[in-house]
Structure formats: structure tokens, C-alpha cells
Image (spheres, rainbow, N blue to C red):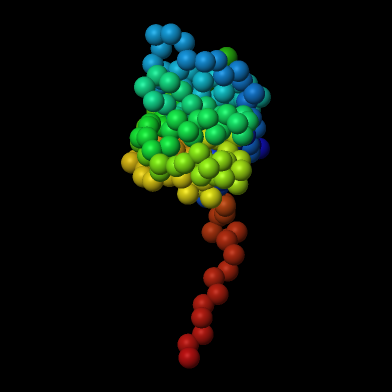
Amino acid sequence: MVSLVLASASQGRANLLRAAGYDFVQQPSNAPEPSLPQGVSVRNHLLNLARMKALAVARQHPSAFVIGADTSVHVGRRLFGKPGTLRAARQMLSFLAGRSHEITTALCVVGPGRPGCRRRVACATETARVTLRRCSHEEIRRHVAVVKPTECAGAYALQGPGAAIVRRVEGDPSTVIGLPLESLARLLKRLGYRPAQRFSSRESRPPIRRAKPF
């Protein structure tokens, strides 16, 4: 039985969750992502998107904990999402290179449901500040050609070769990648998530082999 679902196609989020020791299945939500409405803060906009994604997948997994997340690079109210094309990636990096900007990730966890009862929901946001190196147009062109960051918010990635363009990170790196692990652990605990135990009894554990003395 599935107990934890990541409602995201992001490989970076999946890698973080796996490295943190969670057993989960990954299922993208395919929920629409509208642009920032007038009069709505960046934080609340991202929370709404994370909630939509989590709830969309939660309908298919009534007995599971479902994680939704949304991340955006922003300078004031100007949002930089996934560029989609190499040309758009070069344009984004031409604006962001040499600048400090913020990255906010919103989390939403939907708990298991009972027949006739509304499912519990817990949400949080985390923000980090990132500064990119100053780069010439040629350096940006080469970087985009190598990294191909078309599916990365802001057209850069903190992990792998994408880190070459990053000068400084202030805050939790997992927020930049798109899944703040400390906040996630708090939300899961609040909703009563307990990781599955590998061994159900003392007898079921593998024998401990003791080293022989020299």
C-alpha cells in the first residue's frame, strides 16, 4: 500500500526525498499553474499552487500522505519560472546574472482521509537568497548549452554542473532545489506520518554477526 506520494515530476525533489530516507512513489499532478494574480503575494500564490497540486493527486490516493510543492525565483513581484526553451533560458540568465534574488518554495502535505471526513492539510513556505556570478553573453550561451536548464526555475540549478553559475546561497539549499526538508519533516509529523518499519518484530531482524577476536 502506498503511504507517501510526491506530487511532482521534479527529479531534484525526488532525489532529495530519496536521500533523506523516505520511501515514496512519484506522480505528477498536471494541475494548471496560473500566473501571479494582481494583489496576491508571491508567497500566497505559491501556496495556492502547491495546495492545488497536492489535492489533485490526493484524490487518487485516499490513504496516503501526499506532498505538493511549488518553487519560484523572484525579484520583487517578477517571477522566473521554467524557461521551457534554451533561448528563454539565456534571456533569464542575462537578467539574473550578477544579481541577488529570492527563491521561495511552498509545501503542502495532505494527510490520509476517512470516509465522510475532510482530509487534513498542512502548508509552509521557505525562502532562500541566491546570488549568481556576473557572466558575459558568451559564458551564458555556453552554460545554457551544457546544462540545458529548460525545466529549472530561473534557468539554473544548484546541483550538478548548474552550480558553476552560483556565487552564494543564503538559506537552506534544499529550498533552492525545491523541497525544504526540515519544513517537510515538521509538516509530516504534524499530520501523523510515521515511516514504515523495516522489521515488525525482534525475531524478524537479520542476525548480527559479531567479529571474531584476533
* Count of all numbered marks drawn on residues in the image: 0
- Residue at image location 51% in from the left, 77% down from the top: 210
User: Can you give x and y, in whole percent of width and height, for residue 171 in the image?
Assistant: 34, 40
User: Can you give x and y, in whole percent of width and height, for residue 108 in the image?
Assistant: 48, 26
User: Can you give x and y, in whole percent of width and height, for residue 152 in the image?
Assistant: 55, 35
Q: Quadrant of the N terminus?
A: top right
- Residue at image location 57% in from the left, 54% down from the top: 199
Which residue extends farthest top? 38
Q: Relative to the observer, which residue lies in front, 123 or 75?
A: 75
Whether 202 is drawn above or below 114: the answer is below
Which corner quadrant of the image does residue 185 belong to? top left
Q: Relative to the observer, which residue lies in front, 24 or 169?
A: 169
Whether 194 is drawn above or below 110: the answer is below
Q: Relative to the observer, which residue lies in front, 202 or 185?
A: 185
Q: Is residue 20 visible?
A: no
Q: Relative to the observer, which residue lies in front, 31 or 36?
A: 36
